[in-house]
Every structure is written in C-alpha cells, then in structure tokens.
C-alpha cells in the first residue's frame, strides 16, 4: 500500500462545461426527431407510389393516356425531391408535425384531383385513396383541420364529378360516384372520432411512460442528496467491472468519507448535517465527467466510479473534490470549522472480484482516516499498468 503526494501531480480538468452537455442532449433529441420524421415520410410515400402503380395499370388497359401518367410521375418525383431538400437542409424542423402532415396530405389530395380532372375514369380509385390519406392523417391533425380537409376533399370530388357529368355527351347517372360520396361522408365523422381517441390514448401512454421513468429514476436516487443510492452503485460497479474485463479498459474506484461527521451533527444539528451532505454531493458531481458514476453508499460515505481512467487521472479528480470540499462545505452549513473528507482510491485489477476491489479501496480510505484525515490515500496494485 502506497500513499501518493497529490502536490506532485499536475492537475487536469476531466469534466466538460455543463452547457456543452446540455447542447449534446438537445442535439441528440433533434436527431432522433429527424430520424422519426424520415421513417414516417418513407412509409407515407408508399401511398402515392401505389396510386401511380394503379394509374400504370389503367394506362396498360388503355383507360389513361401517357400524358397523365407522365404528369403523375413528375409530381411524385418533384414531391420526393422537395422532401429530400427539406430533410437535408433540416428546414422541416422549424415546422410542427401537424403542419407537415396537413401539407403532405393536402398535396397528395390536390395531385389526385388534378389526375381526376385529366382522367375521369380514375374517380373509381379517388375516394378509397382519399379515405386512406384521411385515416393516416387523423392521428396528427387537429379535429377542426381534419374536418375542414375532409369536407374540402368531398366538395372538390363532388364538384369535379358533377362538372364531368354535365360535360359528358352520354349522361349516365353516376350512381357509383354518389355511393362513394355517401360512404366518404358517413366515414368522416368516424375517422374524426377515431383520431381523437388515438390522440387521447397516445397522451395517456406518454404520461404513463414519463411517470414510469420518474419512478425508475427515483428508485436509483438517494432521497437526501439526489445522487445515486447504494443499490444502484453496487449494480453499476458490477456492470463496469464486466465492461472493463470485456473491453480491456481501466476502472478506478474511490471511497469518500466526511471527517468527524458526528461532531457536525452534534454541534449544529442533523438538519445542518443533511445540508453538508447535499452540498458535498452537488460539489462533487459538478466536477465529474458524464461517464463517471457518483453515489451515496451510506451515512457520510460516498462511492465514485471512474471508467476508462488510469490511476493518475483518477487521483487528480478526487484530489480536486477534496480541495473543493474543504473550501465550500463549512460555509454552506455555517460551521465554525472547515469540513474535510478522507478518500481511498484504487484501480481495478483485471479478473479480480468486486469484493477484493472494494476492500482495497476501503482499506485505503481507512488509512486516510488514521493517517490524519483530509487526504487521499492510493493503493496502487502491482498488476495495474499506468
């Protein structure tokens, strides 16, 4: 067992600014949202592609001329290019999901209306395709917008059919078209109610998911200090050990104990002692990396796991925590004397048990206590490579 003088080691800062961490989280959330929108758009593109395939079948049967088919293909290609540019430039992130859904649904319906005007025979597939678009849009659109879009689609289809009927030399009463209009009109309120029900279920599931996340997070946290609790720390220690073995990486463990904590409770009371614990946890976590794991082991003892960290850098980190504790804790609790910490630090030996690692760090912490407190004692294993 060896005690290392921290003053001989050059200090370095292992933690990045909090603002950078927050920015990374926001960027990750934005990227996830963008990926989800791309997947949704790819699925929605199947509908106009299927509609174009149906037009091609009409063309093969001689019911639609090549001009209509080429025009429909050109509109599909133009829409795809426009969507690609929106996603590539990330301009789409400025709009809400509801706005993008309304824009996309309106564009597809207008394209089908243009095809209907050019090829009246396509009205047999217009209503089924329009209903499918409305079904896909019901979940995201507001009820008023959804209703207005449905009424507009039905009115446009009715006006187009009526105009084609009046312009036709052979005026056969469009019974089939009227039946489709009736089915569309009767289905629209049901789709509106279905969309509202789906939105309510989604909100309920979202709220339930948030509550479950909060419960899971609370189960991992210490109620007093807000850092991780003993159960989570021991589980994380086992996991980090497995990762270190699998990836042949370094792992350091530190046990931190507040000196003379019982005296603090006796002098200023337990409430002030609790404030010291909370302040220490906050000060320590502010100067750790995001991959470091810090938690309360019990009473006034804390554990610090430092993955992928050699012993030298780990010593720099815990020595900084010791300095900051001595400088700040007594001020927060309005004590007459400074509050210090004793720290035992060691490095994981590949293949050893959790008990051996923990016992070695605990023994180092005990030496720091018996050796005068307010210091860091490091046990440097012979097998550890610096």
Image (spheres, rainbow, N blue to C red):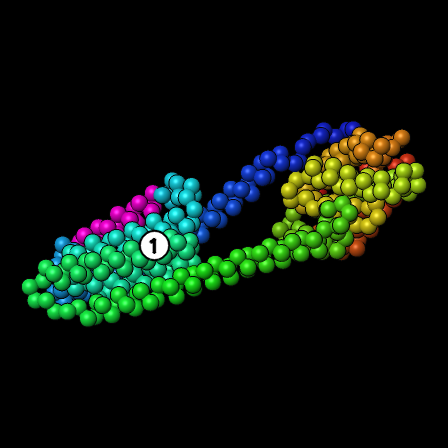
Return the residue nearer the eye: 89 or 101: 101
- Left or right: residue 181 compared with residue 313: left
Rendering coords of residue 243 (x, y %): 65, 53
Query: In this rendering, does residue 52 appear at all?
Result: no
Rendering coords of residue 284 (x, y %): 74, 38
Whether residue 74 appears in magenta in the rendering, the answer is: yes
Whether residue 129 appears in magenta in the rendering, the answer is: no
- Most common secondary structure along the magenta stretch: helix
Q: Is residue 358 above or below residue 126?
A: above
Query: In this rendering, does residue 8 appear at all?
Result: yes
Q: Residue at x 87, y 43 (%)?
A: 270
Q: How many marks?
A: 1
Q: Residue at x 81, y 40 (%)?
A: 275
Return the residue nearer the eye: 136 or 17: 136
Q: Which residues are magenta?
A: 70-85
Q: Is residue 46 above or below residue 322?
A: below
Q: Which residue is mark 1?
A: 148
What secondary structure is marked by label 1? helix
Quarter where residue 282 is shown: top right
Rendering coords of residue 257 (x, y %): 83, 43
- Left or right: residue 194 compared with residue 58: right
Return the residue nearer the eye: 188 or 283: 188
* Residue that sits furthest to the left in the current view: 169
> Quadrant of the image for the C terminus?
top right
> Quadrant of the image for the N terminus?
top right
Q: Residue at x 72, y 29 (%)?
A: 10
Q: Residue at x 24, y 65 (%)?
A: 125
Return the residue nearer the eye: 64 or 123: 123
Rendering coords of residue 27 (x, y %): 51, 42
């Amino acid at each position: 067992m060896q005690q290392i003088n921290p003053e001989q080691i050059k200090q370095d800062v292992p933690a990045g600014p909090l603002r950078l961490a927050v920015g990374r989280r926001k960027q990750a959330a934005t990227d996830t949202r963008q990926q989800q929108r791309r997947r949704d758009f790819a699925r929605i593109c199947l509908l106009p592609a299927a509609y174009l395939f149906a037009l091609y079948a009409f063309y093969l049967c001689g019911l639609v001329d090549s001009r209509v088919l080429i025009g429909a293909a050109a509109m599909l290609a133009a829409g795809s290019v426009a969507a690609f540019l929106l996603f590539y430039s990330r301009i789409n992130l400025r709009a809400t999901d509801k706005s993008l859904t309304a824009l996309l649904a309106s564009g597809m319906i207008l394209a089908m209306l243009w095809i209907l005007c050019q090829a009246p025979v396509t009205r047999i597939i217009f209503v089924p395709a329009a209903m499918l678009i409305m079904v896909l849009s019901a979940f995201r659109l507001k009820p008023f917008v959804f209703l207005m879009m449905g009424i507009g689609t039905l009115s446009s289809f009715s006006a187009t059919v009526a105009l084609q009927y009046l312009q036709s030399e052979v005026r056969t009463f469009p019974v089939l078209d009227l039946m489709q209009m009736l089915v569309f009109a009767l289905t629209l309120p049901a789709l509106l109610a279905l969309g509202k029900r789906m939105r309510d279920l989604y909100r309920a599931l979202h709220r339930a998911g948030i509550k479950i996340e909060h419960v899971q997070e609370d189960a991992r946290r210490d109620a007093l200090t807000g850092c991780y609790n003993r159960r989570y720390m021991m589980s994380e220690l086992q996991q980090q050990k497995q990762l270190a073995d699998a990836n042949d990486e370094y792992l350091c463990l530190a046990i931190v104990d507040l000196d003379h904590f019982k005296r603090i409770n006796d002098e200023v009371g337990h409430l002030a002692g609790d404030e010291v614990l909370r302040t220490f946890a906050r000060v320590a976590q502010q100067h750790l990396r995001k991959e470091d794991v810090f938690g309360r082991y019990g009473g006034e003892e804390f554990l610090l796991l430092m993955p992928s960290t050699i012993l030298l850098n780990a010593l720099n980190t815990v020595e900084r925590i010791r300095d900051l504790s001595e400088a700040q804790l007594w001020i927060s609790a309005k004590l007459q004397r400074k509050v210090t910490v004793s720290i035992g630090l060691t490095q994981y030996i590949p293949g050893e048990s959790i008990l051996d690692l923990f016992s070695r760090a605990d023994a180092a912490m005990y030496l720091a206590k018996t050796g005068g407190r307010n210091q860091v004692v490091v046990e440097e294993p012979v097998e550890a490579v610096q």
